[in-house]
Every structure is written in structure tokens, then in C-alpha cells.
Image (cartoon, helix red, strand yellow):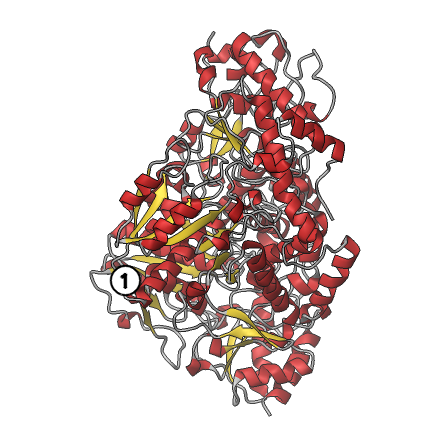
Amino acid sequence: MSYVGRSEGERATMLAAVGAARFEDLLVDVPDVLRVHEPLDVPPAASELELRAEVGALAAKNDAAREVPSFLGGGLYDQYIPSALPRVALRSEFMTAYTPYQPEVAQGTLQVIFEFQSMIAELTGMDVANASLYDGASAVVEAGYLARNQTGRKGVVVAGALHPHYEQALGTFLGKEHVRHVAHAPTSGVVDPGSLKLDKDTACVVAQYPNFFGGLDDLQALADAAHAAGALFVVAADPIALAILMPPGMLGADVCVGEAQPLGAPVSLGGPVCGFFAGKKEFVRRFPGRIVGETVDGHGRRGFVLTLQTREQHIRREKATSNICTNQGLIALMNTIYLALLGKQGLVDVATLCFQKTHHAAALALAQGIRPAFDGPFVREVALRLPVPAAQAIRKARVHGVLLGVDGAVFAEETKDVLLVAATEKRTLQDIESWAKALAEAVK
Amino acid sequence: MTPETEIPSVQSGAAQARPGKDAPPPPGALAGLPPPAAPVLPPVPAGIVEPLLSELSVPGHRGVRLPACDVPETDMRQALPAWAIRQEPAALPEMSEPEVIRHFTRLSTLNHHLDKGIYPLGSCTMKHNPKINDELAFLPGMAGAHPLAPVESIQGALEIVHRLEGMLAKITGFDAVTLMPAAGAQGEFTGMLLARAYYASIGETNRTKVLVPDSAHGTNPASVHAVGWSVVEIKSKEGHLDLAVLKAALGPDVAAVMVTQPSTLGMFEPQIQEAADLIHAAGAQLYLDGANFNALVGLVQPGKVFDLMHLNLHKTFSTPHGGGGPGAGPVAVKAHLEPFLPGPRVRRSGDVFDLEPTRKESVGRVHSFLGNFGVLVRAYCYIRSLGPDGLAEISREAILNANYLMRKLAGPYDLPFDRPCMHEFVLSGRNLRKHGVRTTDVAKRLLDFGVHAPTVYFPLIVEEAIMIEPTETETLRTLDLFADVMLRIAREAREEPGTVTGAPWTTPVSRLDEGRAARELKLTWKASAKT
């Protein structure tokens, strides 16, 4: 396969035009010792038909090809994607455009981002949002950088059950020595705000809402503790749950971030997904990444541009607020279309169905003596305490055609008997009953 | 003439108001016949171009509906604490499906895009995005794979990751690859972390400086800063690394040197081997910013000289840019850096794939999961489609295209470095300044012809820079048409500069007031509605 349209005659014309007898004459600066003289050691070219067969066979090895009912969550959720969404999102006009460097021919992309920012601000209850970041982890990390720059302090305190991968990324980017984990209480699954032990080096407190186990930490109490210590309060939130939950902006959050994948993007092995980043307006000049603002053109017509670019690496270089260059434009577009298609009532309906179905799954588990791991409320995901290691139960259930849930060992060795279960609006009563049967078999 | 009178009035028509003799061509003129003589009015009325979702919303309209609840219901007010329950639904739009479809479809038509015409942004490698790759990335088995599923459930996905790592190692000539970084900048950051972990392992923690040429991408110094190291900018000489300056800057406190090859000027660093010898003798790592790898595929294996590099799969490996992402920024390393790669990594034992527990020496996790998998699938498909010959053709035709265009444009545009280029080249618009025309005006005028502008004002070391990267997938015909437009604009700059400085004339909006956007900061529709 080749995507180059070039005849021998054209090549000869072009070489002549540049005064080269052969292509090699153009490589005046490339030392011969560095040249590759052998063909690259990759498999021979596959035609489109052959490629389709090859990748189709690889895809068929994944359970997702058979639409096995999935109760997996852990930060990525199997939500229904309306048919209209890919039809619009995958249009060439969006897919094959790049960063809107020339806003006069990029108003489509720019207005979509402005709408994305508006709806993320609305869901989170924050003043402003950016154009998106790579994923939930990068959004949490960038919130840590913002807090550091704002407070001049280094420490990040993780309050309770933050997604373990986000916490690992915090360690990678901000330095493990600066990240302190304050454990959730073993019975409630939530953190005691009195146990944070914040000090003059705490730049921010980070909590998840709902937390990794699906429960609800007392955000306002955590915010008060953070603010009393002069630190910022960062909340990592699930955007679907925010349809029915009090927005973090009304519970003391200074920055609210999270993973936007559930808003209409496929799980796709965890990428590309989309981190959202919202906050109070006084911090906007410390925001990472791209931000779109409204303005007017020469006719006074409304238009949109990338703004506050003096924060960014291409201008500020090492003094930039972040090294981030791209956003996740295509996924943010999917999120925007999703929110428009579902709308004000539809998103509440999705969140309510997730709440109801997960509660029903928990009730069926309880009927067979399997209790939640914690005694507090949960929203759209529940942590169950199994009599056997979760990994073992998950493998057994898979043989019965059910993806039972996420292994609690992802969080910590101590929670390896915890199974995280999320039933989305896609799971029918029958799916949930099959799940309960598979669970009963799997813990025998 | 005041700026107001230069702008064509929609009511009175553009012809009277515009300076100059030529009428503006319609958008898309490049693809067909020469522009007609009659002026073309902007296709939208003055005022709002496309309403916002918030303005289209009508209370009571509904889009997608969901099934009724089929399970026994739990009372939410009993199950959740009162403080946690949202009192008012979020003010999201209320629209029917056709309204939503029309809104986004109309918005899409306001974009220039690669499937419509040339997009010669330097350093961005806007090459054709093969359609089969998108389709295969969205196969249910790929798009639905969950990274926290048991590994038995995602064998095909892990296998494709493992295969792609192997193929990229072969193509670049390195020993190991991580696909986890989500973008080039994250790849750079990961690269710096790898160097830091390596030096920590050999007890050389005093190495905290990174040398970065003055022509580097802005992400280079920003990524160095993000790991807490300091940047030392090194001045280039005639667009190339200056070995004397490099040698003087090297020392026991230098951890790495970041080089873009070819440089952002589109020129191969001819003394890279000598530079590498100096850098290695000083004990530092030689990092390659692989943004320009499109010039090197099948031609040069960086692993022969460099210690590590990042790749931009959305550039060299043709994955769609998506209006600004997602990208993917894999990092390839020599063996001495492999133990430090981010984890978890995909491991193969016989025909079974699993995730290796993250090693103790690893720098840790840089992504929520395993990276931008959907982008990786597309890159895999691209490499499999091209094979060894197709891959070698990338750099060969990209270099030929760039040289061809450069020769056509040199003269009317100033060519600061007059020698054969690699996959891109940098012109300067400084000779147009005497006519009152700047590079940004040239960029805006190009938009009138259905052409995207090149990268402008970068690299920073070239005055009024115009950085052009045609890529290998542009045909001779398109290059000729693009050159004709560029030459026409150079003539306009001399003969009727107002036509250039007032451009664009035919785009959905005219030049936008960026200063006002930054001063007034309307970043949401709520803020917009307040005025």
C-alpha cells in the first residue's frame, strides 16, 4: 500500500527542477555512515483486505468483540454511545483538522471547545474549564502543579481512595517523596478529615468523588481542612455521577478534574480518553493546556480563539505553566456531542439508571450473603467483600461469560478480596441476574 | 485608509470596499480553476455565525432517550446523604437529535481540514490519514477493550501493543520502546525522567542541566523544567549545532542534550556523530526530539547515535490530529535505559500476553492506563500497510516534495539557509516588510485560497519565519498550485499590499481580535451571556 501519488515521470520532473540527478544528491548533510542501507526489518506490506483480516483476528481475541456483559469500571465505564455521535464526530472536518492555529478556518473546532468548556464548568460547578488534557491522571497531576505554583509549597496529600493510577502518576510527575497518602477508614471506606495532618508544606489535598470504591467522602469537611492549612482542594470527579451529585464547586473545591471518557467515548483500553480540568477563575492564569475564549472579528461578529497563550510552552518555554501542548480535541468533541444529545434530562437519566442498576446488583449480592466492603453510601459503583480473592472470582466468572468487575488488588494488596462493580445503563435486569449467578458460582 | 473601510461590508458588497484590483478567490480555489473576477460575499450574515448550544436550547426538547428502569428502585434520597444530592440539574442544552446534528455539522463546515486541502504546517506532518486505520481502531473488540479486565479478556489488544513496540524498535534502531506517553511532550518528559532515574542508579545525581539548542520546540525546555532540571540554551551557528559552543557547555553537571533531527529549520545536523561523541565523552545522554522523524524513516536509524528519542505517532505514523489531539508519544531507548521505562509493560510468554508488574527501577506511571491505544492501533495498521518499501518511500518523497517547493518559492520569499532541505524548510517574510506586509498577513491571505497556512513565527531564530512541511502525500499538482498561490501573494504584497494585510476576505469570520479575548476572558457561555 502506498499513500503517495507519484509517477516516475513526475519524480524525474521534480528532481530536475531542484537540480538533482538523483534523490541521494539531496542528502548533502546526511553522513553515509548513518544511512540505512538495508530494508527495514518489518513484515511485508499488507493490502487493505489482508490488514482487515489480520486486525480483525486480533480484535476477535478480545472479549469486547463478543459484547460480553461488563461490570467493569474503575475510572472507565461502558456507557451507551448514541448512534448520532460517531456519525458527526468522525467527520473529516473534525478528524483531519489540527490545533486551531488559524482561527478564521477553525471556528468549528474552536466553538466546540468553547461549548465543552462551558458544559464542564456547568457539571463541576466551577467558573472555568480548559480545552482538556490527556486523561484523568494528567488532569490530577496538572492540578498538583497548579497548586504548587499557587501556594509555593510542594506537598500533595491524597485523601482516601483516589484512583491508584492517578496517585501513581502524581508520584511520577511530582515526586513520590512529595505525595502522602492518608488512608480511608477500614469500615467506612472514606477518609477522616481530622486525620489529614496538613502542614505548611501542603500545596493541595486531593480527593475523588465518588471515590475509587464508589463511596462519598465529605468534600466540604476536606475543603475546610485544606483551606485552614492554606492549601488548595482538588477533586477528581466522575462526570456521569455529577449529573445527580452536588457539584464540587459548591462543596469547596478550588480545582475539579476528572476523566471525561464516560461522556460518549469508547473505553479503548484506556486511551485515547480525555482529562477535564476546571477551576475557580482566579486560578485561570495558572491553568495548563489550551483555553478557548470568545472575541469578535473585524465585522464585529462573534468568534473564538485560543487565548491566554502566554501561559503556554510555545511562548514561555521553560517558564510555562505546563509542558502540555496538545489537548484531546477529538475526545472532547465526542464529550460535547454526547452532552448535547443527552441533554439536561438525559444525563440525569443515565446517572440515575447507573445508580439504580448498581444498587440492584448490590442487593442481589447481599441476598447471597456478599456484603459491601464498606458501610457508607455508594453512587454508581459498589465495592463488595468476597470470601475469595477477587482475581480468582473474576477468572471463574469470565468462563461463564460475565466480566464480573474490577479486582480490588489494583488499589492495594489489602483490598485483593474486594470486587468493584459498576452496572451502567447498558446492563439489563437479565444481565444483572446473570451476573449475580456468576458471582455465586465464582465465590464457591 | 482606516481598518474599518478596508473590511468588506456585507451589506454593500466586498468589491467596492476592498482595495486592490483582484477580487478575492472563493475558498477552495486551489482545488480547481483560477479564481473568478467577481467578488464573493462571506457565506454568512453579519452577526452570529453559528449559535451556541445554550442559545439553541429550548426547554422541553429531548434528544436521545433511555430505557425505563427495569430493576427495583432504590430511593436516592434515602441512599445518599442530603449534602451530596444535586438540587438543580446541570444547565445542559435541551435539543432534539436533528438540532444537534445540524449544529455540529454546520460547525464542522467552518474548519479547514486535511481531507479538503493541503495543510502545510511545519513540524506538524499533516499527511493523509488512511481511513481503514480509523475503522479498525473502532472495531468493537478494540474500542470496547477494558484495561482493568483480566488479561485473558484482552489478549488481542495486548498483542497489538507488543507487536507495535517491536516494530517501532526496528524502525528507529533502538532496543526497547514504551507506548505509554500520550503525546510528544509527555514523551519528552518521560525521556527526561528516564535519564534522571539512570543517573540516580549510577550515583550521578549532580547532573541537573540539559542543553537545548535555540531552535528547539518550546516543549523541550518546558519538559526539562517539569522534571525539576534547568535548561541551558545553546546558540546555533548558521542553523546547525555549533560544536565549539556545545563542547564548552558540556560538563559533569550536564544530564542530557536534546536535539531535533532534522532541526526545526528542516536541515540535517551533519556533525551529529561528532556531537554524539562529545556528549557521550562527557557522560551525558543524547536525546532526539522525534517530531521530524518523517524525514528519517527508512533513511537513518537514530538508535545508531542517540540514547533515546520520542516519536509522534500522529505525525510520522499518520494518525488523525483530531482538531488538536489525541496524539501518542512513544519513547524508544537503548538498553541501558530500558529498566527505567514506565510500567506496567506488556510482556509475552509464548503465545500469552500479560502485564509485567512495574519494576522497582521504573520511573512509574505516566498515563492512567497503557497510553492512547486507539492511536496505537492506527499506527500499527499504517506500518503494516506500508511495509519496508512503503516506509522508505515516506522520507524519500517527503524530502523531494520539500525541496521542490523550496526551490519554487525561494526568491520572492527570502530563504535564510540556502541548501537542500530535508522534509521541511523555513522561509522568511522579512523582505515583504518594506511593503508593510508581515508573515502573519501572508498566512491569513493563504486562507482565502482554501489553503491552510504554514507554521509561522517558528523557529524563533528566523525573523518572520514561514515553516513549510508539505509531507509525502501531496501530489505534484497540489504543490504547484500551492506555489502559485504563494507567488501570487508575494506579488500582491508588492503591488496591492492592502489585499494581503486585510486578509482573510472569504473565510467564515475575518481576522479575530485576540487581544480582546485575553482582556475580557469569556471562557464559558455563561460569561458570554452576561454582556
Looking at the picture, how far across and down is residue B273, in whole percent? 43, 47
Looking at the picture, how far across and down is residue B432, in whole percent? 47, 15
Q: Is residue A11 visible?
A: yes
Single out the residue that lies furthest toward the left: A200
Q: Is B478 placed above or below B12 here? A: below
Where disc 1 sits, the SS reads: loop
The reply, left or right, for residue B499 in relation to residue B250 is right
Along the viewing direction, whichever of A256 and A158 lies nearer the viewer: A158
The reply, left or right, for residue B40 in relation to residue B510 is right
Q: Is residue A254 visible?
A: no
Looking at the picture, how far across and down is residue A373, in whole percent? 47, 81
Q: Residues within 10 Å of mark 1 (few under 14, many from 20)?
A: some
Write down the residue under mark 1: B204
Along the viewing direction, whichever of B291 and A101 lies nearer the viewer: B291
Looking at the picture, how far across and down is residue A443, in whole percent? 58, 89
Along the viewing direction, whichever of B126 and B290 lies nearer the viewer: B290
Quadrant of the frame with the C terminus of chain B: top left
